[in-house]
Amino acid sequence: MGKYILKRFLLMIPTLLGVAVLVFVLLRVVPGDVVELRFMSGEGQFADPQMLAMERAKVGLDKPMWKQFLDWMWGIVRLDLGVSMWTGAPITEEIKLRFALSLQLAIMATVVATLLAIPLGILAALKQDTWVDYTVRVFSIAGLAMPSFWLGILMILGFLVIFKWLPPMVYTPLWVNPWQNLAQLIWPALAVGYRYSAVATRMTRSAMLEVLREDYIRTARAKGLWTKLILTRHALKNAMLPVLTVIALEFAFLLGGLVVTEQVFNLNGLGMLFVQAISHRDYTLTQSLVLLVAFVFIFVNFLMDLLYGRLDPRIRYR
């Protein structure tokens, strides 16, 4: 098991390096930069070229690309992400509060999606082609059809029209006021969680139907084992592998992919920061955000690999 873990961990390093090279090159292929954007928007298109060159020298854009890349990599090794080219604030501080918000929202939405998806998927598989199965399928298809931000708008309108109440619109950290924090984040978590539970529900149903047709399930039933024991000990464990993959990928996506939903609920998370960084052509901030999200994706997949090895020992023995 130790060799398996080490091998999976070492594979993370070249993947992160490849992401870093790719995002660094692609950002500089796009015409224009943060200095040009700042001065052109403020002084029209006749900015002094000498002033532009001086500003580029201040933020390090006058250096060769390979030198900029090495400086960035050396900063990452020292856990120093540098400063934002647009605001001049440390990138660590820019990300810190927003990451806590996005991480909490992603965890809450994943919990909601898991609590909805797995029981409903199992129930639909056990009651295949009955009214229960059809109801679960309609429920999941409705979740796929409704964007989470649209569902969030409906929730806010419902609270306002029916209950004459709005959830808090100013973010409060969990450690400052847990009740106010949950009163604000539970609603986007429900909207997003329902949307992503639809995919996991259909995956759980399909995986369970496939497993329930296996020979060892028929053998267990022929031996007279309880249905509950067959489901928990034999069927569910083997059916969970593809379901865990879907849930893990959705969790990683939620950290930076909820731009519109964050705007609906007035949440200043990583999605909003991504939009601001790209619109300002803030190279250092955009690079750090992309690398952070890539690290989350890779780390979550690493944890899933370990969980696969625990659920199915044949994987690590291969």
Image: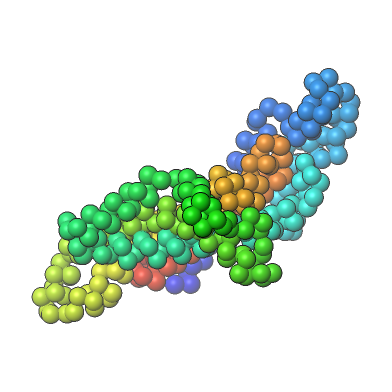
Percent across and percent down for residue 168 are: 62, 58
Q: Is residue 301 visible?
A: no
Residue in front for this viewpoint, 21 or 218: 218
Whether 293 is drawn above or below 283: the answer is below
Residue at the image point whose x is 46% and y is 65% from the top: 111
Residue at the image point whose x is 80% and y is 21% from the top: 45
Percent across and percent down for residue 105 are: 55, 59
Residue sitting at the far left: 222
Residue at the image point whose x is 70% and y is 46% from the top: 285
Q: Quadrant of residue 245?
A: bottom left
Residue in front for this viewpoint, 105 or 200: 105
167 lies left or right of 243: right
127 lies left or right of 294: left
Residue in front for this viewpoint, 192 or 90: 192
Quadrant containing the N terminus is bottom left
Residue at the image point whose x is 56% and y is 57% from the top: 165
Quadrant containing the C terminus is bottom left
Q: Quadrant of residue 169?
A: bottom right
Q: Quadrant of residue 62?
A: top right
Residue sitting at the far top: 46
Labels in figure, total: 0
Q: How is the image coloured?
A: rainbow
Percent across and percent down for residue 203 are: 32, 56
Q: Is residue 278 visible?
A: yes
Percent across and percent down for residue 4 are: 45, 67
Whether 283 is drawn above or below 105: the answer is above
